[in-house]
Image (cartoon, helix red, strand yellow):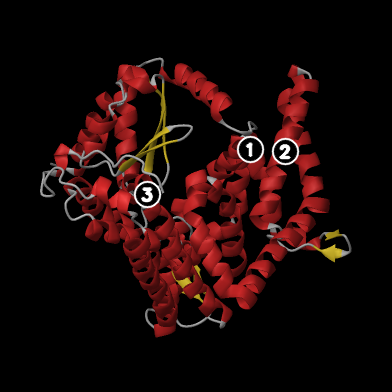
Amino acid sequence: MSTDDKNRAIAAAILPLVGGAENIGSVAHCMTRLRLGLRDRSLVQDQALRALPAVLGVVEDDTYQIVLGPGTVARVTPEFEALVAAGTPDLAARGAAIKAARKERNATPFKLFLRRIANIFVPLIPALIGCGIIAGLNGLLVNLGWLPALTPALAAMASGFMALIAVFVGYNTAKEFGGTPILGGAVAAIIVFPGVAKIDAFGQTLSPGQGGVLGALGAAVLAVYVEKWCRRWVPESLDVLVTPTLTVLISGLVTLFGLMFLAGEISTAIGDFADWLLANAGAGAGFILGGLFLPLVMLGLHQALIPIHTTLIEQQGFTVLLPILAMAGAGQVGAAMAVYVKLPRNGSIRRTVKSALPAGFLGVGEPLIYGVSLPLGRPFVTACVGGAFGGGFVGLFNMLGDKVGSTAIGPSGWALFPLLDGNRGLGETIAIYAGGLLVGYVTGFVATYLFGFSRELLEEFNVDTEPETMPATSGAPAPQPAKV
């Protein structure tokens, strides 16, 4: 079976289990999940869906999210959209209405704000990853003195996107806030234009790129409000000329003589604070960040960190926070392995652990979170303990002067190795990160093995279920939530 046929078969298998094309209101995807807006939640066959070999897990939020894993989801989604569109010609209009109704009913203002932030930055992640890996390869070649004729070309490929990232942020911001995307990009482009070096603001000469992504975000939001004001007051006959002109003019002037300076100060403060925190309290900060990241993910609050990561990458070339936060996944993997050992009779849970561990090692934690640790209760807490110790380990080395960073956001676990960078040699950076993963694995395992199960929890779950060697296609129901 070809790759296209395989992806089409996965989409075709999923569609009837979520109620068919008529039940789909919207289709989207992120790094790992197929996100569906459903018309009738009761039509979904959860157990059958979880039993599909390609499905790593299911998450419910403002959308119904099917975890397929990185790479797979990007290929399955177009096939799924084609099947849905073929079955529902009026999908777009009805889907938009359903999505709007669901958001209005379920989203708090704060969560809506975080989702908007995510919608702005998540589409940029593939480019950040690709350019980050090329940057790492280029750095390796430069250090080794290999292929000197090629390294300038690689440097251009790696740096081109980051040099213009403000434009993409402005475009996505205007799109997300209901403005004309190209106008948001046009205003944000002012920030990276070399000619701003001739402009004085607040007694200082502006620098191209000053304010970075935060300035671009603010400029584009302002452009949206100016544009909407113009749409209300400018006569229709003049709209095509006056509205875009006033939008760029007003927003541009405010950006040049206000936002760039303000956003630049905030961006600098973020970088300085991150450096100070890890230099002076690295182990403690890493312990807290690594321990709290899994709960942040559960609450969706981790999205607030995306602009901070992007700002650090833009300023320093890498974000020192991501390798620390990635330790949460290591604690999760260690906890899952302990669950496997502690429940030798429960073939259902052990089979879930075995199928989800490869994805967990690569940084895709949802199958282990929602299929193993969270339903069991205590293992989720002990997984956080593993993440805390792993984060503390990486933070300690940051405090000792060895910065460990990532040139892109998105991947974690083993998938983060190609994106690692720091202020020392690459070998040392990799060794510290690998050491943090090992500490996370071991601590998560030990904490879960010793403290992750009460007597009642063992009596409830260490019982004979389906054989562990049962074919994966038969599926196994996730354990029911237990008391911590």
Instruction: Check the image and report above or below for 163 versus 77.
Output: below
Upstream in sequence: badge 1 or badge 3: 1
Give amino acid for label 2.
Ala
Q: Looking at the picture, how far across and down is residue 96, in whole percent?
A: 50, 22
Q: Looking at the picture, how far across and down is residue 299, in whole percent?
A: 52, 44
Is residue 394 shown left or right of residue 217?
left
Residue 436 lies in what quarter of the image? bottom left
Residue in the image at 89% along x and 64% along y = 203
Taking depth in this image into account, of 394 and 266 the one nearest to the observer is: 394
Taking depth in this image into account, of 446 and 156 the one nearest to the observer is: 446
Is residue 306 shown left or right of residue 441?
right
Give amino acid for label 3.
Ile
Residue 179 lies in what quarter of the image? top right
Upstream in sequence: badge 3 or badge 2: 2
Badge 2: few (under 14), some or many (20 or more) residues near its Cα, within 10 Å? many
Q: Secondary structure at mark 3?
A: helix
Q: In this figure, which residue is indicated by the disc labeled 2?
A: 223
Residue 397: mark in rendering: none
| Res. 153 visible in picture | no
Badge 3: few (under 14), some or many (20 or more) residues near its Cα, within 10 Å? many
Residue in the image at 16% along x and 43% along y = 465
> What's the CA distance linking mark 3 and mark 2?
41 Å
Q: Secondary structure at mark 2?
A: helix
Taking depth in this image into account, of 129 and 230 the one nearest to the observer is: 129
Q: In this figure, which residue is indicated by the disc labeled 3?
A: 369
| Res. 453 visible in picture | yes
Proximity of marks 2 and 1: CB atoms separated by less than 8 Å: yes
Q: Looking at the picture, how far across and down is residue 220, in whole percent?
A: 68, 42
Position of the N terminus by quadrant: top left
Q: In this figure, which residue is indicated by the disc labeled 1?
A: 174
